Image (cartoon, helix red, strand yellow):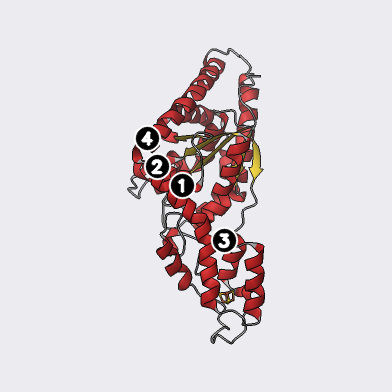
Amino acid sequence: MRIVSGMRPTGKLHLGHYLGVLQNWVKLQNEHECFFFVADWHALSTSYEDKLNLKHLSIELVRDWIAAGIDPTKATLFIQSAIKEHAELYVLLNMITPLGWLERNPTYKDQLAQIKNKDIHTAGFLTYPVLQTADIILYDAEAVPIGEDQRPHLEIAREIVRRFHHLFLCEVFTEPKELLSPVPRLLGLDGRKMSKSYNNAIYLSDTSEEVWQKIRTAKTDPQRVKRSDPGNPEVCLIYDYHKAFSDEEIIKKVEEGCRSAAIGCVECKKWCAASIEKVLEPMRERRQSVSDEDIAIILQKGEEKAKEIAGKKMERVNKAIFELQCKDHT
Ligand code: SF4
């Protein structure tokens, strides 16, 4: 299968991103033809006022991907804004997308209601799913790995494809399927949603010292005041991290040792940090081994490949729209 997925460059990636998205991408790249891109235009839709250095953020995002195990010899990596065909297709799709589809989009409505610190009453934000549709169908992606919040966007993509085929009497595109990855939710170390703005996340680029400081100072079961007080792992975030990163044997030791006060929290946290290190240490090595120049070359190659597919697709699309000439893709 051909798979396309994108990520917005909004800052360094943390363990939540790894569990929720990257781990899945790493698996998919071995089984399918994958295109992973940096959605820098999408980032602008909510951050146009933030004066972000999107170029820098995009490159750092790719560095995080490679550190996490995305292999540029297997997957094609590129930056969205380098492939102008995304914008070209977006313009054309906007012409045929009914406003109602966009205004009814539940993800859009949720975000309008939730995001208060930015003005997202813009055409770009409303039409976010149209750009996302272009990203996907430009490459005839058969499947798109997404989280729950992105389901309405994929539904819109499918509807736009059908509408295009109907209006221009030409089956140019592939209708993408969703690949819903069961996202294990990992909370930040203070029990809130893991986020840069709460400063409660462990980053893929953290040093072992930083990881340990964050784990060491995290709150545990408040009932365990003294070392001899038995605890309840179910109310402790450290236990969640064990469940996400430790093997069965350690999880069992923590569960029993916590309830019986056979282990102390410091000991438990040391095991926890060690389990996280098992994931992060290989990432540090990979990060070390890829230079800025390597990343530039990786992106250049990825962009060449993406550009070739996207360019051919746009020829077809333009023929269908402007010359009423259909050359079906199947
Ligand atoms: Fe949390 Fe571990 Fe302490 Fe139990 S022993 S309260 S699971 S840190």
Pointer 1 and pointer 2: residues touching (CB < 8 Å)?
A: yes
Query: 204 or 285, which is in the foreground?
Result: 285
Which quadrant holds the C terminus? Answer: top right
Q: Report the Cα–Cα distance between label 3 and label 1.
A: 20 Å
Q: Report the Cα–Cα distance between label 2 and label 4.
A: 10 Å
Q: Residues within 10 Å of mark 2 (few under 14, many from 20)?
A: few
Identify the residue position indicated by label 1 in the image.
Answer: 67
21 in relation to 228, above or below: above
Which residue corresponds to the image point at 56% horizontal and 33% vertical from the top-left? 136
Which amino acid is tagged 2? Val
Whichever of callouts 1 and 2 sits on the residue coming sooner in the sequence is: 1
Provide the secondary structure element on which disc 1 rests. Answer: helix
Query: 184 or 273, which is in the foreground?
Result: 273
Whichever of callouts 2 and 3 sits on the residue coming sooner in the sequence is: 3
**Is the distance from the Cβ of mark 4 to the nearest ligand 1 atom less than 8 Å?**
no
Q: Which mark is residue 290?
A: 2
Identify the residue position indicated by label 4 in the image.
Answer: 296
Q: Residues within 10 Å of mark 4 (few under 14, many from 20)?
A: few
Whichever of callouts 2 and 4 sits on the residue coming sooner in the sequence is: 2
- Residue 221 pos. (x, y %): 57, 78
Q: Report the Cα–Cα distance between label 2 and label 3.
A: 28 Å
- Residue 43 pos. (x, y %): 43, 44
Which amino acid is tagged 3? Leu
Which residue corresponds to the image point at 45% horizontal and 67% vertical from the top-left? 212
User: Relative to residue 96, is residue 119 drawn left or right?
Assistant: left
Q: Report the Cα–Cα distance between label 1 and label 4.
A: 15 Å
